[in-house]
Every structure is written in C-alpha cells, then in structure tokens.
Amino acid sequence: MANIYCDREKEHALTVQRVKEDIMLTKDAEKVSKIFQMLSDAGRLKIVLALLKGDMCVYHLIEVCDGTQSNVSHQLRILKDNGIVKSKRLGKNVEYSIADEHIREIVEMGKAHLLCMKGKK
C-alpha cells in the first residue's frame, strides 16, 4: 500500500529498514547522549579544553576557566563521575586529566564544525 504522505516511499522504506538493523540500542544511545550532555555545559567544556592541553590541578583550572574553586570543583566532580576526566593525587594536590582520548576527537570535531559554520555565514 502506497504512503500518501511520501512520494519516495520505496527509498525511504529501505532506509528505515537499514536504520532499524543498525540503530543503537536505547541504552547505548542514552550513554552517548550523556557524553554530549557533559560537554554541553560551557564551564565543563572549558575545563575539558584546558585539560586537552595538559594535566592540571584545580588551582590552575580555576585560573584558566575564570571560575570559583567551588564551581570548578563541582564541574570536575561531574566530569569525573561520568568518565570524562580522571584524577590522581600528587602529594597534597590532585591533578586532573582527560580519561579517554575519544573526548579529544569529539571536541576537535566540534571545533572543526564551528569553523565550517563560520565560513558559511
């Protein structure tokens, strides 16, 4: 039976079939969505961008991000709890770093997309 709302029914039906065979499970889609949620906050993204340049302690992240100790620590906790950053104790300091190099790829792709969009204006 032809779909009266779509004039490309056969093409789209094949696409739907391929998507259904390949689409992420809801559970996995939620996990990927969580990564983007972590990076969607400007404060957390600033922290991630800083850590992509090198490992840092909270004191220096506060300086780089122009944040308060409370706010930066809170954002670091969220990033750490969600596997974006990791920490290690060095003497009386805690040093933070990126937990997974895939984060670098995601952020770099976002930056490249921004440059592309600027070129289209």
Image (cartoon, helix red, strand yellow):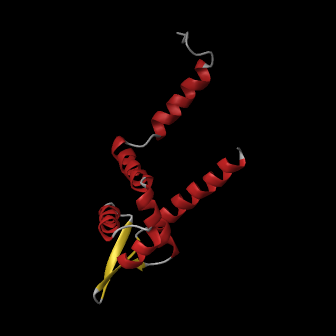
Q: Residue at x 39, y 45 (%)?
A: 29
Q: How many marks on residues? A: 0
On the image, which quarter does residue 55 sit in?
A: bottom left
77 vs 106, nearest the viewer: 77
Report x, y in % for residue 105: 54, 62
Q: Residue at x 36, y 76 (%)?
A: 58
Q: Residue at x 27, y 87 (%)?
A: 92
- Seen in the picture, residue 116 relative to 89 is either above or below; the reply is above
Quadrant containing the C terminus is: top right
- Seen in the picture, residue 97 relative to 12 is either above or below; the reply is below
Report x, y in % for residue 78: 31, 61
97 vs 59, nearest the viewer: 59
- Seen in the picture, residue 67 relative to 9 is either above or below; the reply is below
Report x, y in % for residue 69: 32, 71
On the image, which quarter does residue 7 sit in?
A: top right
Report x, y in % for residue 14: 56, 28
Looking at the image, residue 117 sits to the left or right of residue 62; the answer is: right
Q: Residue at x 52, y 9 (%)?
A: 1
Residue at the outermost bottom position: 91
